[in-house]
Amino acid sequence: MFGSITDVLDTIVVDSEFVEEKAKAIITDVLDTIVVDSESVEEKAKATGYLKVCQTFEIAFILHLMRDILAITNELNESLQKKEQDIANAILLVKVVKKRLQDLRNEGWDSLVENVSAVCVKYDILIPNFDEFYVNFGRSRRKVAEYTISHHYRVEVFFKIIDWQLQELNDRFNEVRTNLLVGVVCLNPVDSFSSFDIKNILRMAELYPDDFGENVMVTLRNQLETYIVDVRDVDKRFSNLKGLGDLSEMLVKVKKHLNYPLVFRLIKFALLLPVATATIERAFSAMKLIKSELRNRMDDDFLSSCMVPYVEKRIFNTISDESIMNRFQEMKTRRIEL
C-alpha cells in the first residue's frame, strides 16, 4: 500500500509547496496514516520513530537554525551559481554573509529560542527545562552529561553549526583565493576599466611565481602603467568592451598583445581560471557517480573513457547513435554488423 517511508518523506520535501507550518503538519499526517494503515510492521516501526523524533524540541530547534543560516547564505549561493558571475559583488557578498553569520552567533540566540518555543507551544511539543542536565538521546538517564541543556543547544549546536559555516567560507575564500579573484576583477575592462588597480593585479601575479619572478614583476608593473593609459585614455577601441573575452580578442586584433605580453599572459590566466575550476569540479562529480561501490574495479583508461562522455554531455548528445555504431564497426572486423 505504501512505498518506503523515506521515499514518502523525500517526495514531500521535494514536491511540497506548503509553508513551514503546513509542511510540518502534512509530514506528521503522513506518518500518522502509515502508523495506522501500513501492513508492514517494519514501516510502522520506522514511521513511529520518525513521528516521535519530528515532535521534539531538538528537531524544531535545528530546523529553525538551519532555516536562518540558509536564508543568510541564499544570495551568495545564487550569485556563485550564475553563468555570468559578477566576481566583485560575489566577494562583497562573502564578507556580508560572514558578518551576518557572526551577528547571528553574537545576538541571535534569544530570538531563535523564542521562535522555536512559540512553535513548540503551538504544536504541543515539550519544551525542556534549560537548567537541567542534558541527557544524550538513546543513553540511560543515569549517564547524564556534565553540562546543562542550555549549554548543549547554545554551545554544541548553535555555536558549532555557525562556526562550521564560517570556517567553510574562510577555507573556500581564503586570502590567496580572494587575491586571485580580486585580481581578475581588476583586469576586467567593463565601464572603461573602472576596477583597474595595479596593486591588486600585482598581488594576483605573485601567485604565479614560475611565470612572474622578482625581475619580471618590475617589468610587469611598468607594462601595467603604460597599458592602462593606452587602453583607457588613448585607444578608444577599448572603451565599450564587455568582459575579459572581448578584451583578449581586441588585444590580439590590434596586436597590442605583442606590446604588453606580461599583461596579456595575466588576462589568459584570468580567462582559464573559471574554465579550469569548473572542469575539475565536474570531473570529480562524474567520478563519484561512475566509479561507485558496486563498480569500483575499473582501470584508469576505462574510467577516463566513461567520464569524458558524461562530463561533455552537450557535445556527445549531438552525435547520433548511427555514427557511433559505424565508428565501432569500422574499428575492427566483427562477426556481425552492429
Image: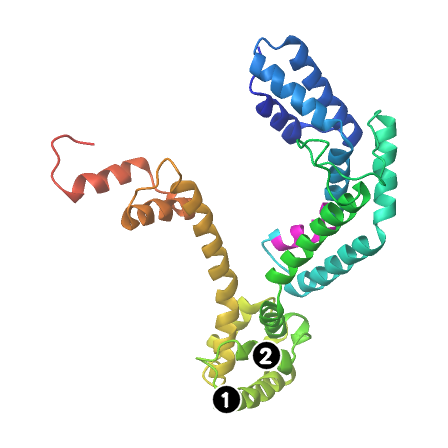
Q: Residue at x 62, y 58 (%)?
A: 85
SS under mark 1: helix
Callout 1: few (<14), some (14-19), or many (20+) C-alpha neighbours within 10 Å? few
The answer to whether residue 228 is seen in the rendering is yes
Task: Compute the Cα span from label 1 to label 2.
Answer: 12 Å
- What's the residue at 87%, 46% (across, down)? 110
44 vs 275, nearest the viewer = 44
Name the main secondary structure of what is drawn in magenta.
Answer: helix
What residue is rendered at 70% in x and 15% in y?
Answer: 32
Residue 153 place in picture, x, y as percent: 77, 43
Queried whether the magenta region covers residue 223, the answer comes back as no
Where is mark 1, residue-wise? 214
Query: Quarter holding the C terminus?
Result: top left
Residue 190 in the image, given as x and y percentages of width and height: 64, 70
Q: Amino acid at mark 2?
A: Arg
The answer to whether residue 2 shows anywhere in this view is no
> Which residues lie in the magenta part?
70-80
Q: Residues within 10 Å of mark 2 (few under 14, many from 20)?
A: some
Residue 279: horizontal and vertical position, in percent? 46, 55
In the drawing, what numbered circle is on residue 203? 2
Q: Quadrant of residue 198?
A: bottom right
User: Which residue, as the protein is rendered here, is positioned at the far front?
Assistant: 142
Identify the coloring: rainbow
Say if 238 sits above or below 310 in the image.
below
Measured along the vertical axis of the image, is residue 43 above or below residue 108? above
Q: Are marks 1 and 2 in contact (CB under 8 Å)?
A: no
